[in-house]
Image (cartoon, coloured by chain):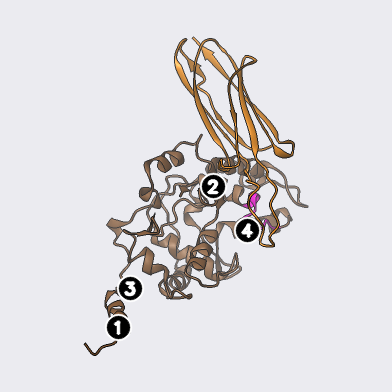
Amino acid sequence: MAAALINVPAKAKRGQIIEIKTLMSHIMETGFRRTAAGELLPRDIITSFICRFNGNAIFRADLFPAIAANPFISFFTVATESGKFDFEWIGDNGFSETASASITVE
Amino acid sequence: MTQSPAITVAALLVMAAPLVAAEIPQGQRRSGFTFMAPETQAMQNDDDANPGMLWVLDGEKLWNGKAGAADKACADCHNDARFSMKGVAARYPVYDKSRGRPVDLEARINLCRAERQQATPLAYESHDLLALTAFIAQQSRGIEISAGSDRELESFVAKGRELFMRRQGQLNLACANCHDDNWDKHLAGSAITQAHPTGYPEYRLEWQSLGSLQRRLRSCISGIRAQPYDYGAPELVELELYLMSRAKGMPMDVPGVRP
């Protein structure tokens, strides 16, 4: 399993704007580079990222070859209720990773 | 004017080329961190945004995982790295009595693997070796570098310094020509830094990966169009040792992020 770093505040006040930060390890090989022998290195990237809160999608992003290795994705949301964030990264060659984090809203 | 233009140009070049300057005065020493844009500094300072932390996480797993014929983990001998490895990276490379030579942290990990774990050595720049090195070195965050203090290392520090000062390659440049004489200037838009290796292994945005000090040295040596030494070569270890002793007293900031 690829290493991932997730930062979700453990606690927040209702209505508070919170920042969610994710970092996923991935080489993000563009598919445009060649080896010293001239052979094309096949594309190997993460193609999509989705964040669900209590089962509902709240953020998603499509990723492309120009995005750097180990993509860092951060976004903001409003804390409405306590629950669980589920993160999912999907990519080439069957790449699929998940992570989750809980928040308590007071 | 009877002088040919070529001679004039050559004369000007000789006049313009500064003598190899003395080393950087203690009070003017800076970490490569201080040369970076605020955005890159922020990336290093935030453990959730610093990609080097991905290697640190993997390194922690390797530290606790059993390996080799001895079926031992690093933790089985060294216990909790937060205590046992604190300050270790700040002392490396150290003098190894049985070999009569300095060894760097990567070499020490592989010696431990061979002798204590009876495991195969990890290749230089392999993910696992970088991960273990990063995890161990991260325990020295904020600790002042003390490498090269051992008296037995004196001659090796001197060898590393000699290599640092020696002009080589098609461009006929010594490390010192950039990193001692011109560290306040730029090379192709990038800041020339002072060669204080406080953050290794470090994440270079250009590499899109974590890399060791030896990788950095090899890139620099290719840059002056010289033949780089092989990974693990005594010359590279001596250079590492000299650079660490140059940075004596400066705090470690592993894993560093650099452009």
Q: Which is more toward the observer, A71 or A86?
A: A71
Residue assigned mark 2:
B85
Q: Nearer the viewer, residue B195 or A61?
A: A61
Tell me how far mark 4 sits from mark 2, CA to CA: 21 Å
Residue B218, image x, y percentages: 53, 64
Q: Nearer the viewer, mark 4 or mark 2?
A: 4
The colour with which the image depicts chain B is brown
The residue indicated by pointer 3 is B20
Q: Secondary structure at mark 2?
A: loop
Determine whether the residue tagged by mark 4 lies in a helix, strand or loop. loop
Residue shown at the point (47%, 47%) measured from the top left: B256
Q: Which residues are magenta?
A: B121-129
Pinpoint the chain carrying mark 3. B
Q: Which residue is mark 1?
A: B5
- Report whether mark 3 lies on the same chain as mark 1: yes
Q: Colour of chain A?
A: orange
The amino acid type found where label 2 is placed reads Met
Parent chain of label 1: B
Is B118 positioned to the left or the right of B127 in the image?
A: right
Mark 3 or mark 4, earlier in chain: 3
Reading the image, the residue beneath label 4 is B124
